[in-house]
Amino acid sequence: MRSRPLTVDSLDFFLMQSADLLRDEVKPSELAHFIGSLLLLKRASDQPGPLLVPDIARWPYVAQHSGSSAGETVNRALDALESHNPGLLADLFRSVDFNALSSERMVVRLLGHFDQVSLSDDQLEFGDEVGRAFDRFLTRTASAAGKGYESFTPRAVCRLMAELVRPGVGHSVADPHAGSGGMLLSAVHQVAEQGGSQATLSLFGQEKNNTAWLTGRLNLLLHGLVEAVMTNSDSLTDPLTDSHRLMRFDRVLTAPPFSTNYKRNEVSHPERMRYGWVPEGGKKADLMFVQHILATLRPEGLGAVVTPHGVLFRGGAEGEIRQGMLEDDRLEAVIGIGANVFYNTGIPACILVLRGTGGRSADRRGRVLFIDAEREVTTGRSKNRIDAQHIAKISDAYLGWKDVPRFSRVVSLEEIREHDYNLNIRRYVDSAPPPEPLLDIGAALTGGIPEREVEAEADRFRAFRIAPADLFDRFRPGYWSFPAEGHTAAAARIPALAAAAEDDLLREVRLWWTDRRPLFEERAEESFPSEARSRLEDSFCHRLLPAKILDRYQLLGVLAAWWSDHEDDFRALAAFGFQAVVHRWRSSPKDAPGHVYRKQHHLRTQEAADLVLDGLGADLLARTEQLVTSERQKLVEAYLRWGERYAVSMVDLERQYQTAAHRLRDRMADLGYF
């Protein structure tokens, strides 16, 4: 067992401390250049690898010669590193100048901070910590910069798009607007989840913004993707070519800038725009980017692109482009995602899933899947976010290619033609919540709760084994009445009535986990098979769906969130065994699931296995219980709404009025007014 390796969390904290040293010195968008350049220099020096490191660029030399000319020492080291690796680092540090910092003392402090850690593989938990920590650092920087950081795509969006297009072993993957490299990294992660190696992927990126290009290139290098191609160029005017012919790829994922202009005479390879040209100067180049992707997909290829909603319904040239794409069967899916997810805009966006010229299966030809996932977000204080459970629901609906009420629908090209090729998602998917039933006039006048309203919600109550007679009394044909205790007191009894059903469901979760424990015990110090998570999802749903308390997407969501939050635990288990997971939890006990860690002495292997598996199971159980509690609370709220509508009828009000009037008359008589 290795001694206390650096985790991604500890490196993330280290980089934030580094940023604090420079916070008042540089713009947020430039922080990554200084931090990333030093990180690459330190990593290349500490860990022998594909980069040639001359003596002047080795960390001990830099640290020892950082006196009165520290900035110049770092600049020379970066120049030397670049010149010794011209094929990998050409022009990388051209805009990085440590002499631009206000004082040599600032550079010395920064170097001293970096001198505290070793970034060699034997000091890291896995080996990709440096890149992952830097990517987290970029996320924090983008969040702080807000709209000033337009070249950063939220990583959850990147993961979602990779889930949709599923890059595989041996694929070529491109991002023509690569920004900080998130799409390409998500493609690598997707392949790794399938058990493949990043070395099997061919990665290509373009980014015309010099600041974003430098950030993205550093990010890829720090992830060990030294063979990835990322050029500082404009994909619209200067697309990637091979022997003057357009390069084509198996997968293309991208989030281009919204609503930009272009100049037609600057666009090379105009054959890409086979469906038409949008007017110049109108800030509507979005469908030009879409056509670029279509032109660069291999026949069996698949692409995904983020666009604003306007491209779905605007007329004119954009309508003609949509028509051409649809008639050629190049559009597979339109997915609306929530508002306020991106850092540079608050408007909702959509993802278009695109096909190559020959990639569609027979059952999908002439059809488009629409998904309205605008509600699939977690609301935050300043930004909303897409979490693992939202990704699971969207990808399941897409990969399953199925209709889901109020969420997704497969639509024929004939129907789209009838709507003049308008792709507005709300036209095809009615995602609005069901309307409140009209007030029953008879009940409002004479009392009672309509049976039809109760029956509309009855399945949800029955899932918790609550019958109408448990909460209502018979009133007259077609109507229930609230019990004598009143609707508020009756609502308070719902948790007790639901307890048995909840206990049974949670017992099934425990039994399911007991059955799964051997899988994790068998995988200790072995890699998880790529289908492990899929098998877990299938068996979890199979076991718990019959209870009808939680639906398929809720179950997929809770398991996806659990898996995502423990991904590093599973990696540690597969790489080093249960002792390594215990070590992770000891290093950050407040993050251990269920705070299960108690013992301070070294644990035997079986003790460690029991501790880890008990903790993982307890965490999954707690997450499921929280979801069940939320569903039960919905029953309470539904019952209280009936109380608001029908607890007091017009007859009751008239009776109350008459009673109050009699009391007032009697009181007035007592006072001698009558």
Image: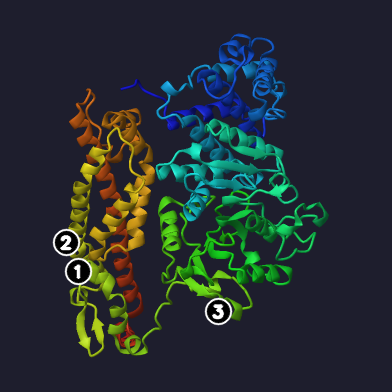
Which amino acid does the dot numbered 1 rest on? Arg
Say above or below: 301 vs 59. below
- State left or right for residue 98 relative to residue 375: right
Q: Quadrant of residue 436?
A: bottom left
Q: Do we see residue 450 in this rendering?
A: no
Q: Which numbered dot is residue 415?
A: 3
Q: Quadrant of the N terminus?
A: top left
In this rendered view, identify the residue nearer to me: 160 or 565.
160
Which numbered disc flags the more N-terminal residue, 3 or 1?
A: 3
Q: Quadrant of residue 611?
A: top left
In this rendered view, identify the residue nearer to me: 202 or 343.
202
Which numbered disc flags the more N-terminal residue, 1 or 2?
A: 1
Say above or below: 444 vs 588. below
Q: Position of residue 603 (x, y in %)?
A: 21, 26
Tell whether label 2 touches label 1 (CB within 8 Å). yes
Task: State the residue position of label 2.
Answer: 500
Which amino acid does the dot numbered 2 rest on? Ala
Task: State the residue position of label 1.
Answer: 465
Q: Position of residue 651 (x, y in %)?
A: 31, 88
